[in-house]
Image (spheres, rainbow, N blue to C red):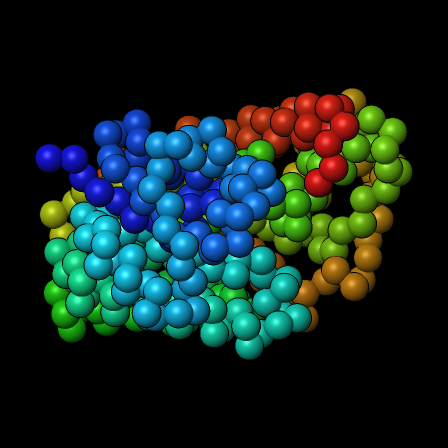
Amino acid sequence: MTKRALITGITGQDGSYLAEFLLEQGYEVHGIVRRIAIEDPAHRLWRILAIKDRLHLHAASLESLPSIYRVFQAVKPDECYHLAAQSFVSYSFEDEFSTLNANINGTHYVLAALKDCAPACRFYFAASSEMFGKVAEVPQRETTRFHPRSAYGISKVAGFDLTRNYREAYGIQASCGILYNHESPRRGFEFVTRKITSHAARIKLGLIRELKLGNLEARRDWGHAREYVRAMWMMLQQPLAEDYVIATGEQHTVREFAEVAFSCVGLDYRNYVTIDPQLLRPAEVETLLGDASKAKRELGWTSKISFKELVAEMVEADMKHFAAGNEK
């Protein structure tokens, strides 16, 4: 019998890679999208256009419990991957209320609908390394205490606790993936990694002259989104629900990311990067480094794409994108 999966956030970076992966596994793949996305597919569905005809898209809003209920009643999924969120950390400082409302209520609505309409459905919650924030230990593992430093991180801690509560109170097979920074050519331009690779490409092509960044010394554990979505799926294939840190176990600074990106196009980042104090976070997360030994031991998952390979893939994609005359 064909398994049926439901993905929230299917139009995003992770959702698009996950949808492709699940189709390859023979799943019937459903996705929740805003109605405006269906009406403007060229701009809002660009990551899934190549597979759109193989997907079942449902117009609904994570801000509306009735609309989420209708989708769950219609689809009755075997697996649900809850990826949708306001995920740009810097924006969460500017609008804390919408970030908290959308991320916490959205997760609660999905869990409530799943419990009532498809209680046997296995659930995945996209948690985040930003939950650790001001880290208590390095590296961080599943038992490390949380100390979030942004509304986004706070909302993810709440979603983590909601997921655990539904697992313990109602017997829902619900797992949380504490994913560290994961990137790809499908990353949004507002994120620092894509900002760096896209600017490197545009500077090389003579389209712009400068790249403004904030904290160059922030240290992150960067992996490839294509590998991380495989870990999501592996979690839901386990007999019992567990929470897992998903990370490479390697750490690099924003400065290193810029250095590698610019070197891919034969440039020295120091000639083009300037510091903009306005881009500094009110409460910075200085260092994040994950210990994914539990995922390796129990899931058999490891990251194989190197840091330099990831950056090079992103720069190459951006060179092709802007060389073709495309805007953002």
Residue 123 location in percent, x, y? 25, 55
Name the residue rendered at 86%, 42% in the picture.
Answer: 210
Residue 256 location in percent, x, y? 67, 39
Name the residue rendered at 66%, 70% in the picture.
Answer: 94
Residue 300 lies in quadrant: top left
Q: Relative to the observer, which residue lies in front, 167 or 13?
A: 13
Q: Is residue 132 visible?
A: no
Q: Relative to the observer, which residue lies in front, 151 or 62?
A: 62
259 left or right of 295 in image: right
Which of the image's four quarters has the C terminus? Answer: top right
Q: Relative to the observer, which residue lies in front, 53 or 15?
A: 53
Residue 150 location in percent, x, y? 56, 69
Name the residue rendered at 44%, 52% in the picture.
Answer: 33
Residue that protrudes farthest toward the front in the picture: 39
67 left or right of 236 in image: right
Count of numbered circles on the image: 0
110 left or right of 96 in image: left
Q: Is residue 116 above or below residue 43?
A: below
Q: Is residue 8 visible?
A: yes
Q: Is residue 227 above or below residue 82?
A: above
Which of the image's four quarters has the N terminus? Answer: top left
Name the residue rendered at 21%, 59% in the picture.
Answer: 73
Residue that protrudes farthest toward the bottom in the picture: 97
Residue 77 location in percent, x, y? 21, 50
